Amino acid sequence: QVQLVESGGGLVQAGGSLRLSCAASGRTFSIDTMGWFRQAPGKEREFVAAIRWSYSNTYYADSVKGRSTISRDNAKNTVYLQMNSLKPEDTAVYYCAASLYYRAYMGSASLYDYWGQGTQVTVSS
């Protein structure tokens, strides 16, 4: 089992920045890829970014590419999502997820095995 706990969400003005954190515990040695997803009210959960636990591969959705950076600290079992130049359309609940297996495309929520409880990000205009 892997447990994931997100933190760092909040209310920010458009153009501002936030850094989300996701702390993993349990069988972290079994994780291959960590991802961030978000879900706005009335919309489906969508991929934001992903990073492999032991390699340098990173992946981003077009909607956040150039504005966000995913990183990890293996010693702390923590993954981060730095979001800059935030827009009102970035408002959503942000979820951290862990996948035990690597696929060429890690942008589908169905590929992830464990999920955190989510953290709210609200961007005001």
Image (cartoon, rainbow, N blue to C red):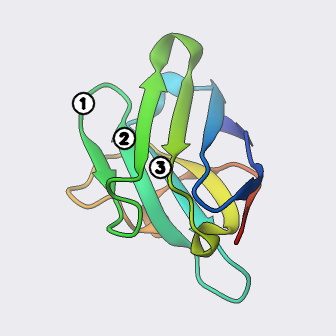
The tally of labels here is 3
Q: In this view of the protein, which residue sits in the foreground, 82 or 100?
A: 82
User: Relative to 82, does residue 44 appear above or below in the rendering?
Assistant: below
Residue 56 disc label? 1
Kindly indicate whether the residue at mark 2 contacts the one at mark 1 (C-beta within 8 angstroms). no
Pointer 2 local density, CA inside 10 Å: few below 14, some 14–19, many at least 20: many
Q: Quadrant of the N terminus?
A: top right
The amino acid type of the residue labelled 2 equals: Ile
Residue at the limit of the structure toward the top, as seen here: 75
Report helix, strand or loop for mark 2.
strand
Q: Viewer-proximal residue, 40 or 68?
A: 68
**Residue 24 or 62: which is nearer the viewer?**
62
What's the residue type where badge 3 is placed? Gly
Q: Residue at coordinates 50% horizontally, 55% vertically from top-left?
A: 85
To which residue does mark 2 refer? 51
Which quadrant holds residue 6? top right
Q: CA distance from mark 1 to mark 2?
A: 7 Å
Q: Are marks 1 and 3 in contact (CB under 8 Å)?
A: no
In the visual, does 67 lie left or right of 84? left
- Do the residues bearing badges 2 and 3 touch, measured as CB atoms within 8 Å? yes
Residue under circle 3?
35
Q: Between disc 2 and disc 3, whose residue precedes?
A: 3
The amino acid sitting under disc 1 is Ser
Q: Position of residue 114 (x, y in %)?
A: 60, 49
Q: Is residue 1 visible?
A: no
On screen, residue 30 versus residue 119, left or right, reads: left
